[in-house]
Amino acid sequence: MSELDQTKKPRRGWKIAMISAVALVIVAGGVGAATAPSWLPSADSSKGSASSAPSVAPTPTPPAIPVTLAVTPEAGTASVNPGAPVVAQAQNGTVFSAVLKDTATGETVDGELFVSGQKWISQGPLKFNTSYSFEVTTADSAGTKATHVSTFTTVPAAHEANLVMYPAANATVGVAQPLEFNFSEPVINKEAVESAIKITSATGQVGAFHWYSDTRVRYRAAEFWPANTALTVEMNLFGVDFGNGMIGNFSKTSNVNIGNKVVMEADAAAKSVSIFVNDQLARSFPATLGDTAFPSASGYMVLTSDKQRYATFKASSIGLKPGDPGDYGSVDVEFATRLSNSGIFIHQATPSAMPYLGVVNLSHGCIGLSAEGAGWVFANMHPGDIVHTVGTPNATIAPTDGFGDWNIPFEQYASR
């Protein structure tokens, strides 16, 4: 037993020694794994651990390109045409907002965005002699906003240009009435002004402008206007440059009504007048026209709006002085209807001339009629009606001595 006991003791010691050795190896291996992994075997050399996989860096976002803003008019501009649009144009971005306002009152002007939000254009007219502020906010591709503020002033009141049209809106006139436009300022850019005035007849007649001066232009067709129709006159002059810095200050549309076609044929040789309404003879009257010293004007004249139930004619108004041949001093007449600025009228003949109606021409160029004849004309003929005189050696009236436009051939009238 003792030997057996002795034999067992060494074996137990061997086991303890082996266990201690294995523990040392395990401890040593753990330390080595933490400090030198290259020498440890891998379970799968083709697969890396999650912690050892390479990471992909995100693509950096490029910086936004700066927005370029162009504004019209430029900041600080003076005498801006109030009819011209105000514009903000962005490149490399958009117009986020735009506010155009009267600097003094804060009143804003409407506008719209175009070109995918890159362009803002004002839609309303501006006012003359006014300061405006224009605040524009832009946004770049990253959404970053920037604001630009500018100011400008419009054309001063002293440079506003206007016109007066004859006949007035909604007036009724005869078929021979030219349209006349008198401007407050000289017109240098005549083509621009003509383009801004559109005249339309119910029958589509083509007409032409004729300039008598830089401040007066008339418009007529090749033939008389059709009876009982209408003309539409569109005057789109706001913002139109007349020249010399003068700018049109209004736009409007007017209508002019055309009445019956009424034509007086006055025959100085026959000493009579015949009046046609819509090409049908209405009345005939004996007359006295200009004598040999003062013959009546030939050709076409147009009744003006000047009618006087009672009138006083003075010889001095036609250049006659006391002692001059033909000086008649002063005479009173009735039913006076003016044909020219120089003093040609249709009127009731003076009592001394009444016996000579249809017999002798005694006047200083006027058309003298009986009370019945002059009264009929006064009541039934209107501005724009025609008087056509024949049988007289005299020339036609000057185009602007009343409305002598119809004495000019249309081809010449329409030429500049």
Image: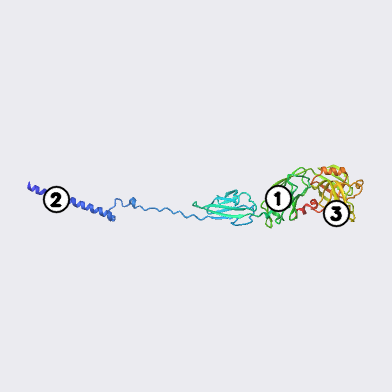
Q: Which mark is residue 223?
A: none
- Which residue is the site of mark 2? 13
Q: CA distance from mark 3 to mark 1?
A: 40 Å
Amino acid type of disc 3?
Ser
Identify the residue at horizontal 10%, vertical 49% (top origin): 7
Q: Amino acid at mark 2?
A: Gly
Label number found at residue 316: 3
Q: Which mark is residue 197?
A: 1
Q: Position of residue 101 (x, y in %)?
A: 59, 50
Earlier sequence position, callout 2 versus callout 3? 2
- Kindly identify the residue that appears in the image at 14 percent across and 49 percent down: 12
Provide the secondary structure element on which disc 1 rests: strand
Q: Nearer the viewer, residue 160 or 398?
A: 160
Task: Provide the secondary structure element on which disc 3 rests.
Answer: helix
**Where does the image place residue 352, in percent across and percent down from the top left?**
91, 47
Query: How many discs mark residues in the rendered view?
Result: 3
